[in-house]
Image: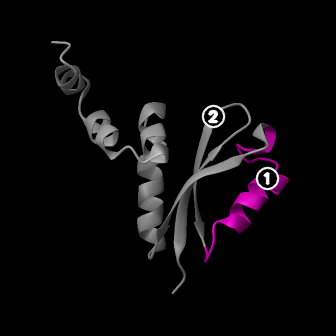
């Protein structure tokens, strides 16, 4: 069974790229981004890139579903995932009004 990864790259312009890769390691895919293998890719003009987070999945379908979910996240939530701040992830997952109540703004 082939495994899969979801990964986040920090690009030279400070943006984040979220991708998935089918294979045993994520390093090969990161090197393709670094080398500019695909000229039409988002990362091509934003090199060098740095791998800042990755997670292994036993099923590619699960990896793609998680990749799509993370791509929809705001920057703060992606940074909480990268930093392993799971308390912040929970707080950032709540509706904006609920986040204000958690902070005591209301």
The residue sitting at 69% across, 48% down in the picture is: 50
Taking 89 as reference, is 11 left or right?
right
Q: Is 88 a magenta residue? A: no
Tell whether label 2 touches label 1 (CB within 8 Å).
Answer: no
Q: Tag 2's secondary structure?
A: loop
Question: How crowded is the residue under tag 1: few (<14 C-alpha within 10 Å), some, or many (20+)?
Answer: some
Tell me which residue sits at (42%, 59%) in the image. 65
Magenta residues span: 23-45
Q: What element carries label 1?
A: helix
Decide which of 70, 40 is in the foreground and name it: 70
**Quarter of the image holding residue 105?**
top left
Give the camera-side residue of 33 and 10.
10
Residue 28: x and y, percent?
72, 67
> Image check: 6 left or right of 59?
right
Q: What residue sits right under mark 1 in the picture? A: 34
Disc 2: CA contacts within 10 A as few (<14), some (14-19) or many (>=20) = few
Residue 39 position, x and y percent, is 82, 49
Compare marks 1 and 2 and give the one earlier in the sequence: 2
* Residue 57, percent from left and from top: 46, 70
Residue 15 image label = 2
Picture quarter with the C terminus: top left
Q: Is residue 74 above or below residue 62?
A: above
* Residue drawn at 77 percent across, 60 percent down: 31
Asked if the magenta segment contains residue 42, the reply would be: yes
Residue that appears at 20% across and 21% down: 97
Residues under labels 1 and 2: Cα distance? 15 Å
């Amino acid at each position: 069974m082939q495994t899969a990864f979801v990964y986040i790259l920090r690009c030279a312009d400070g943006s984040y790229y979220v991708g998935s890769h089918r294979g045993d390691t994520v390093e090969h895919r990161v090197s393709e981004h670094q080398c500019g293998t695909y000229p039409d890719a988002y990362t091509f003009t934003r090199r060098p890139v740095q791998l800042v987070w990755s997670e292994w999945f036993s099923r590619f379908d699960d990896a793609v579903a998680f990749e799509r979910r993370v791509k929809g996240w705001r920057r703060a939530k992606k940074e909480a995932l990268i930093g392993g701040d799971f308390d912040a992830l929970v707080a950032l997952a709540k509706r904006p009004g609920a986040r204000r109540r958690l902070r005591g703004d209301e």
